[in-house]
Image (cartoon, rainbow, N blue to C red):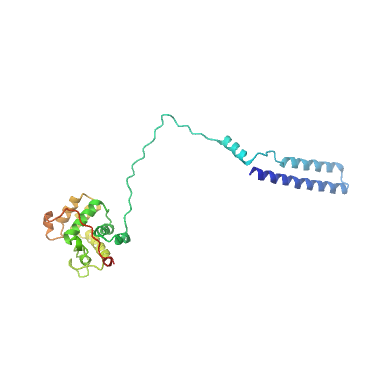
């Protein structure tokens, strides 16, 4: 940057000198007063000297001088302590409908109901829901009639023994039934608050979902639910 400025100033000096010389010759030819000519010459040399660069240092030297002149330091006390950051918890991303359809399992369908219901996909929520699905339709054919929970809400035939066009519609209708029917308030509150599994299950048994109330839990199985994939055509 400094070298470029030096060259520019030198060029300007030469231009001014030539113009001053030309003006002086014109004045002499026109027989102007000698004092005026002398004044012009003096002015020209003053301008040349004024604009002439006085600093021929290199760019690297100029940068070093600037850094030295503007350097800043930070002093940390010997007894300084590192502040602990507040715990902001863990963050996760909930899968969407397309992702769950691609997974295609009974666990994916349970998560889809949580998604449509606006409830967290917590471990207890999914554990309870897949157990509930097993009580209604065993894992090998959990997708039977595209109605995993034998839900009668919005089915094509109007009864719990009817089915849905696909499993996505079934998940949406199941969430809608749980969110709408007053008799299922305990179930939806349990899912919404991600309560412990035993509390949600007790709400299911007490609800009117099943007329036998699963024998108040006596017919409930607690073994791990087998993960089974439904046919791709069932998802619509």
Quarter containing the C terminus = bottom left
Quarter containing the N terminus = top right
Residue sitting nearer the eye, 101 or 37: 101
39 left or right, relative to 73: right
Q: Would you place residue 223 above or below residue 173 in this image?
A: above
**Residue at position x 69%, y 45% in the image:** 7
Residue 130 locus on image (x, y percent): 21, 57
Q: Would you place residue 125 above or below residue 63 in this image?
A: below
Q: Is residue 21 visible?
A: yes
| Extreme-bottom residue of the structure | 157
Residue 179 locus on image (x, y percent): 23, 59
Residue 103 locus on image (x, y percent): 29, 60
Residue sitting nearer the eye, 165 or 179: 165
Residue sitting nearer the eye, 193 or 75: 75
191 left or right, relative to 49: left
110 left or right, relative to 8: left
Residue sitting nearer the eye, 229 or 68: 229
**Residue at position x 78%, y 45% in the image:** 17
**Quarter of the image where one finds residue 67:** top right
Q: In this figure, what is the number of numbered marks?
A: 0
């Amino acid at each position: 940057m400094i070298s470029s400025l030096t060259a520019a100033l030198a060029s300007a000096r030469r231009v001014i000198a030539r113009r001053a010389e030309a003006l002086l010759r014109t004045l002499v030819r026109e027989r102007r007063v000698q004092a005026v000519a002398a004044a012009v010459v003096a002015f020209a040399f003053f301008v040349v000297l004024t604009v002439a660069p006085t600093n021929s240092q290199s760019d690297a030297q100029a940068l070093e001088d600037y850094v030295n002149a503007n350097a800043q330091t930070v002093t940390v006390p010997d007894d300084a302590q590192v502040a602990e950051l507040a715990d902001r918890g863990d963050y996760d991303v909930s899968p969407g409908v397309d992702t769950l359809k691609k997974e295609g399992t009974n666990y994916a369908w349970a998560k889809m109901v949580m998604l449509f219901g606006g409830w967290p996909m917590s471990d207890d929520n999914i554990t309870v829901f897949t157990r509930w699905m097993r009580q209604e339709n065993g894992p090998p054919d959990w997708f039977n009639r595209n109605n995993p929970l034998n839900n009668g809400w919005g089915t094509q035939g109007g009864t719990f023994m009817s089915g849905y066009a696909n499993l996505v519609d079934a998940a949406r209708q199941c969430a809608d039934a749980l969110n709408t029917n007053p008799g299922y308030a305990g179930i939806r509150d349990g899912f919404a608050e991600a309560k412990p599994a035993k509390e949600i299950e007790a709400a299911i048994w007490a609800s009117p979902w099943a007329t036998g109330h699963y024998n108040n839990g006596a017919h409930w199985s607690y073994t791990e639910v087998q993960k089974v994939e439904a046919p791709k055509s069932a998802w619509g």
